[in-house]
Image: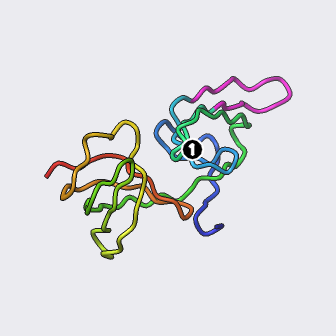
Amino acid sequence: MSDEIEHVIMKEIGKGRFILIDGEPCRAVEIDISAPGKHGSAKMRITAIGVFDGKKKTLLKPADAYADVPIITKKRAQVVSVTGDHVQLMDAETYEVFELPIPEELKGSISAGMSVELIETMGRKVITRTINE
């Protein structure tokens, strides 16, 4: 698992960047930085949305502290079949076939034969969007 995580200084993290909060990969959606105090450094509050669970999470740390950032791999896959709330996909590079749940926001818009974009990190995968070709 340590080869799928890198350590980054908090002040290098921007909106849209991925970060680990409570061991869950999240995408930063809001960043607040407080001014340095008399006896301490500036603090950063990062509000993020979980990539896999969609839950809102918050991380509060000094701006010069280190945070864990997951290494994200974006992939393309072709939809082989749709069964209820799950979709069978074939990786465009390795031709591996696997099954994933369809995200709520994409239900009804995924059909066999189309391409989708995936995010893979920490041994888990999720569909992020459909690709119109």
Quadrant of the drawing holding the N terminus: bottom right
**Residue 7 image point, x, y percent:** 64, 56
Q: Residue at x 35, y 71 (%)?
A: 97
Q: Residue at x 46, y 60 (%)?
A: 120
**Residue 70 image point, x, y percent:** 56, 56
Q: Residue at x 28, y 54 (%)?
A: 116
In the displayed structure image, the side of residue 73 where residue 79 appears, left or right: left
Q: Is residue 38 above or below residue 93?
A: above
In the displayed structure image, the side of residue 20 where residue 93 appears, left or right: left
Count the labels in the image. Answer: 1
Q: Which residue is mark 1?
A: 12
Q: Residue at x 54, y 29 (%)?
A: 30
Q: Is residue 129 above or below residue 123?
A: above
Highlighted range, magenta: 31-45
| Front one among 54 and 80 | 80
Q: Is residue 82 above or below residue 92?
A: above
**Pointer 1: residues within 10 angstroms few (<14), some, or many (20+)?**
few
| Front one among 73 and 117 | 117
Location of residue 82 (image quadrant): bottom left
Task: Assess whether residue 1 is covered by the magenta stretch.
Answer: no
**Disc 1 residue type (three-letter):** Glu
Looking at the image, the residue that sits furthest to the front is 84
Coloring applied to the structure:
rainbow
In the displayed structure image, the side of residue 110 where residue 84 appears, left or right: right
Q: Mostly what secondary structure, the magenta segment?
A: loop
| Front one among 86 and 79 | 86
Task: Assess whether residue 42 is covered by the magenta stretch.
Answer: yes
**Residue 125 image point, x, y percent:** 46, 58
Q: Please tell me whether mark 1 sits on a helix, a strand or a loop.
A: helix
**Residue 26 image point, x, y percent:** 55, 44
